Image (cartoon, grey):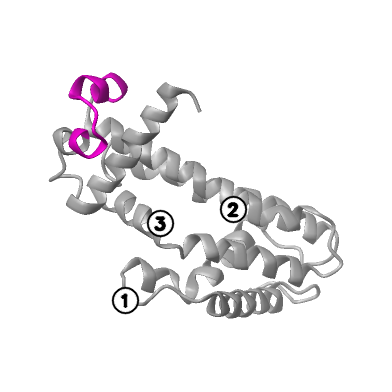
Amino acid sequence: MKKSEARRQAILDAATGVFHASGFDRASMSDICNRVGYSKATVYGYFKSKEELLLAIATEAAETEFAAAQVAMGALAQPAADLAAALDGFGRRYLAFTCSPEALAMRRLILAEAGRLGLGNQCYDLGPARITAALAALLHEAMDAGQLREAGSMLAARHLKALLDAEWGERLLFQTAEAPTPEQIDGAAQRAVATFMAAYRPGRPLPA
């Protein structure tokens, strides 16, 4: 990493820490400068305001989420005799990322400030929307191969994500539960995939 890139990342990391600790409204550029140990001239040379910093942090987080989902979907991109097993592998990796303290803290920050600078729309488009579209493309291939019943693949992708998030998503986001263990993540993924496969098994009639 070049020196300028390293400095930019250090500023982003410091701002993330300040925003998490103090909240966006109470945070100041001076707080961020003090935390990172750079002069105001240096920090302002990279970011003109804390709003610009927040947008950069949120964009980076959305890209990280999408990259993690792409890794999790790797197994689905390969022809699989056992689709349920491939979906289970995706589900475990997806939940391991989304249930991590780092991902949850970032999601809380983004949701709290979603109305600023079009942050909500931009982060949704860069993260969740791209993940859903990529997953839908893979599920469409499974439908074409006769592994799932023919249905709207985008809706199927949303259903699968909702099932994966069902057991832990809201509870962790609202901090009403401790982070799940690997065993609990495995169980949640297995139950979500089993429910999805039961709903989308070949030959099952479409709802009226």
Q: Residue at x 80, y 75 (%)?
A: 203
Mark pair 3, 1: CA separation: 16 Å
Q: Is residue 113 visible?
A: no
Sequence order check: which comes first, mark 1 or mark 2?
Answer: 2
Q: Residue at x 53, y 79 (%)?
A: 184
Q: Which mark is residue 33?
A: none
What amino acid is found at the position of numbered circle 3 in the picture? Glu
- Is residue 43 covered in magenta? yes
Q: Estimate the x, y position of residue 21 in percent, counting from the top left.
A: 21, 53
Q: For marks 3 and 1, give the one nearer the viewer.
A: 3
Residue bearing the label numbered 2: 69
Q: For marks 2 and 3, give the one nearer the viewer.
A: 3
Please tell me whether mark 1 sits on a helix, a strand or a loop: loop
Foreground residue among 77 and 49: 49
Residue bearing the label numbered 3: 102
Foreground residue among 197 and 40: 40
Sequence order check: which comes first, mark 3 or mark 1?
Answer: 3
Q: Estimate the x, y position of residue 176 in percent, counting from the top left.
A: 31, 76
What amino acid is found at the position of numbered circle 1 in the picture? Thr
Q: Which mark is residue 176?
A: 1
Mark pair 2, 3: CA separation: 15 Å
